[in-house]
Image: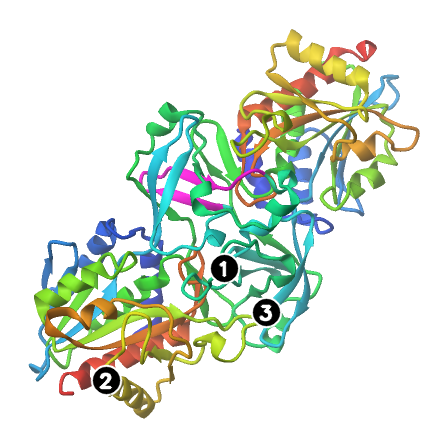
């Protein structure tokens, strides 16, 4: 069993780093600095960080474990004459979590996203959620020349959302999707491995699972294990199957989402393994979302794939919320699954 | 202290309408640098007096409001989520997934306003209703939550002050801590100067729920003249130009049938004479600020309004230019030294 304090310290550090799709270098650098010295490390052409580490035995099946480094963010598309920054989301972001937020750039520039005050809205405007393309980022510039000293089109920026523990064993922060998966992989990589394994920290998941497709092609694994976060809708007013999955009920093992019909045997194996070890586990009650599995299972002639996810509220917002015990359940389930998949 | 540091201290202290204690105490400490009489009254208003009641000079009130918008916990549900009502005009467009602090008797605890992610939400075109807010405080049932939170606790959306480029800053509660900072800046400028007035300071509570603190506290005032300051709308391209001031263009001198024309003209004349950047804010009726309560207090107080242009009012990302705050402070100081006889 791992030291939980260390795991959540790692998650906090990873959550605070910024790296959206195509801008993952800071995350990659951080992870590289924490890899065991006996691992074989390379960065492929698209930016995936591929780590191979020998275990006690060579497995029957070649196993690849994936988590993505990128988070949702924004890219600057245009600077207006009056110095406002027009932007596009990188990854799926609801307009409701964009309005009234602060964003930060790599060079420390701070911006805010809002519009005219509610006092100035017509009755019909009051009911409307402004669309992202109607909004702009204000960095305090008085004109385009002023803004261009700090920001250029093509620059990325990020939600300003601090990582914190709160409530009874909960955490919140930006980019927990999927830095938690990265933290779990780093933790496992630094343990004694029962079998040789490939660990891939992928890029560009949020814009269509692009990095994982290349990684799977290059590695050609027999089995893919995707470590992820998944939508939990167990909030006030949400009942029955609409809750999708719930915090406090353990690791989520998926049988199907919008990108993948998961390998049935691996699904059953993951749930059985978790049950046998007393690891809380659940599945999703709605076919929703998708992850790197979508690319991996179709790659290189087909890869048997399973996904182990941490149930997460408010995904793709500055404040994703998780319960710590679900994170450790996912870590424990992943550790066991690497072992069992080797001979599955 | 730099004006941005004063503003940072003021904005960091929380004070939702009717629960202004932390903000009022911070303002009271800052005011204590200028008078020993600074105190917080029973209604959360900060008051102070500078001068001598027996010197025969008239008294001017310098006023800003100390409260900020926010929420109040109304109910804790079976699963430990909090339902809330609004204190003041909160902006429905920005509720989703905001990090909030619930100000409990034992201190602040964190929460997040529930929302559904894009993966499962089909309609993203409608603003969330306040009645649909549920706050996630990391509890799984009512009993757990009740140990932490009580109905009546106030809630703020978090945002510490951050600097934008140039002299602009962003934070929550700049409405109206910027006004408090302007008054403090005026007092700093007046230090050691001969004043034409005795000065009453009022940082009023409960403005956001209908100018209540100002009404209560101004009843006890002996001022014959008042200068109130609040934030007003700075132009953004989606607004109407004629309904806004411009950020960075100085103090917005209010012109309104409800304000004293003599005070207003004096402010304009002083701004011109002393090269203080200013612009006019012309309103058809009342002003929607504490000026409305102050000017009709007891027998009537001749009241002027000087506003600070602000973008994104009533959001956690309000933006103000500290040069505009200084302009308002300079104008107030000019008025206090400028001579009662001119009014």
Q: Chain of mark 2?
A: A
Q: Nearer the viewer, residue B28 or B333?
A: B333
SS for dot 3: loop
Viewer-nearest of discs 2 and 1: 1
Residue B117 lies left or right of residue B304; in this view the side is left
Q: Is residue B189 above or below residue A26?
A: above
Horizontal arrangement in the rendering, residue B165 relative to residue B180 (left or right): left
- The furthest residue to the top: B273
Give the residue at x 35% y 85%.
A279
How far apart in space, not on screen, are marks 3 and 1 (Cα)?
Answer: 23 Å
User: Which residue ends up furthest to the front in the rendered image?
Assistant: A124
Magenta residue span: A101-116
In which quadrant will I find the N terminus of chain A?
bottom left
Q: Which residue is mark 3?
A: B81
CA–CA distance in space, label 2 to label 3: 36 Å
Q: Position of residue A87 (x, y in %)?
A: 37, 41
Q: Is residue A65 visible?
A: yes
Residue at x 38%, y 75% (from the top left corner): A287
Instruction: State left or right for residue B163 relative to residue A289.
Output: right
- Disc 3 sits on a residue from what chain? B
Label 2 belongs to which residue? A266
In the displayed structure, A26 sits above or below A211; it is above
> Mark 3 or mark 1, which has the lower sequence index?
3
Crowding at dot 2, Cα within 10 Å, few <14 / some 14-19 / many 20+, comes out as many
Q: Position of residue A159 (x, y in %)?
A: 40, 49
Q: SS at mark 1?
A: loop
> Residue A34: in sight, yes or no?
no
- Disc 1 designates what residue? B123
* Closer to viewer: mark 2 or mark 3: 2
At which x and y percent is residue A298? 17, 71
């Amino acid at each position: 069993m791992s030291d939980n304090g260390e795991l959540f310290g790692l998650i906090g550090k990873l959550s605070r780093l910024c790296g959206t799709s195509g801008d993952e270098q800071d995350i990659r650098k951080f992870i590289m600095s924490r890899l065991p010295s006996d691992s074989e490390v390379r960065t492929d052409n698209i930016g995936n960080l591929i780590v191979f580490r020998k275990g006690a035995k060579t497995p029957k099946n070649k196993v690849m474990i994936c988590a993505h480094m990128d988070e949702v963010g924004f890219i600057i598309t245009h600077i207006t004459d009056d110095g406002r920054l027009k932007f596009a989301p990188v990854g799926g972001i609801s307009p409701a979590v964009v309005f009234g937020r602060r964003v930060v750039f790599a060079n420390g520039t701070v911006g805010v996203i809002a519009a005219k005050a509610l006092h100035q809205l017509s009755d019909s405007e009051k009911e409307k959620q402004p669309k992202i393309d109607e909004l702009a980022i204000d960095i305090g510039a008085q004109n385009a020349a002023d803004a261009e000293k700090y920001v250029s089109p093509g620059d990325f920026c990020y939600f300003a959302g601090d990582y914190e523990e709160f409530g009874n064993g909960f955490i919140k922060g930006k980019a927990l999707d999927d830095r938690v998966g990265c933290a779990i992989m780093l933790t496992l990589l630094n343990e004694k491995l029962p079998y040789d394994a490939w660990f891939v920290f992928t890029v560009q998941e949020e814009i269509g699972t692009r990095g994982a497709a290349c990684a799977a092609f290059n590695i050609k694994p027999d089995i893919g294990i995707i470590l992820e976060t998944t939508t939990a809708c167990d909030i006030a007013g949400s009942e029955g199957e609409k809750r999708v999955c719930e915090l406090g009920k353990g690791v989520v093992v998926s049988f199907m989402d919008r990108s993948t019909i998961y390998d049935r045997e691996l699904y059953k194996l993951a749930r059985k393994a978790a049950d046998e070890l007393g690891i809380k586990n659940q599945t999703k009650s709605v076919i929703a979302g998708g992850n790197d599995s979508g690319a991996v299972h179709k790659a290189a002639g087909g890869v048997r794939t399973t996904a182990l996810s941490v149930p997460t509220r408010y995904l793709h917002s500055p404040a994703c919320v998780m319960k710590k015990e679900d994170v450790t359940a996912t870590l424990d389930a992943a550790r066991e699954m690497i072992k069992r998949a080797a001979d599955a | 202290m730099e004006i941005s540091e004063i503003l940072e201290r003021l904005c960091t202290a929380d004070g939702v309408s009717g629960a202004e204690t932390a903000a009022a105490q911070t303002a009271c400490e800052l005011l204590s640098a200028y008078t020993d009489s600074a105190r917080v009254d029973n209604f959360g208003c900060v008051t102070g007096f500078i001068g001598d009641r027996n010197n025969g000079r008239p008294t001017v009130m310098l006023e800003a409001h100390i409260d900020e918008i926010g929420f109040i916990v109304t109910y804790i549900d079976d699963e430990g989520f909090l339902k809330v009502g609004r204190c003041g005009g909160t902006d429905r467009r920005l509720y989703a997934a905001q990090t909030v602090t619930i100000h409990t008797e034992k201190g602040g605890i964190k929460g997040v306003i529930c929302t559904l992610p894009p993966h499962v939400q089909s309609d993203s075109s409608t603003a969330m209703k306040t009645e649909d807010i549920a706050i996630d405080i990391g509890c799984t049932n009512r009993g757990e939550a009740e140990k932490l939170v009580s109905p009546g606790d106030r809630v703020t959306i978090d945002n510490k002050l951050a600097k934008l480029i140039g002299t602009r800053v962003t934070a929550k509660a700049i409405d109206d801590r910027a006004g408090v900072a302007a008054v403090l800046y005026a007092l700093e400028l007046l230090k050691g100067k001969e004043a034409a007035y005795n000065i009453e300071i009022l940082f009023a509570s409960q403005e956001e729920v209908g100018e209540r603190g100002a009404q209560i506290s101004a009843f006890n005032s002996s001022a014959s003249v008042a200068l109130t300051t609040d934030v007003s709308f700075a132009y953004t391209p989606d607004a109407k130009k004629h309904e806004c001031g411009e950020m960075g263009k100085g103090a917005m001198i209010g012109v309104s049938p409800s304000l004293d024309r003599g005070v207003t003209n004096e402010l304009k004349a002083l701004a011109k004479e002393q090269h203080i950047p200013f612009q006019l804010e012309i309103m058809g009726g009342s002003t929607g600020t504490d000026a409305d309560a102050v000017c009709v207090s007891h027998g009537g107080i001749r009241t002027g309004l000087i506003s600070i242009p602000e973008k994104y009012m009533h959001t956690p990302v309000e933006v103000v230019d500290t040069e505009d705050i200084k302009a308002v402070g300079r104008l107030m100081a000019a008025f206090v030294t400028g001579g009662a006889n001119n009014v």
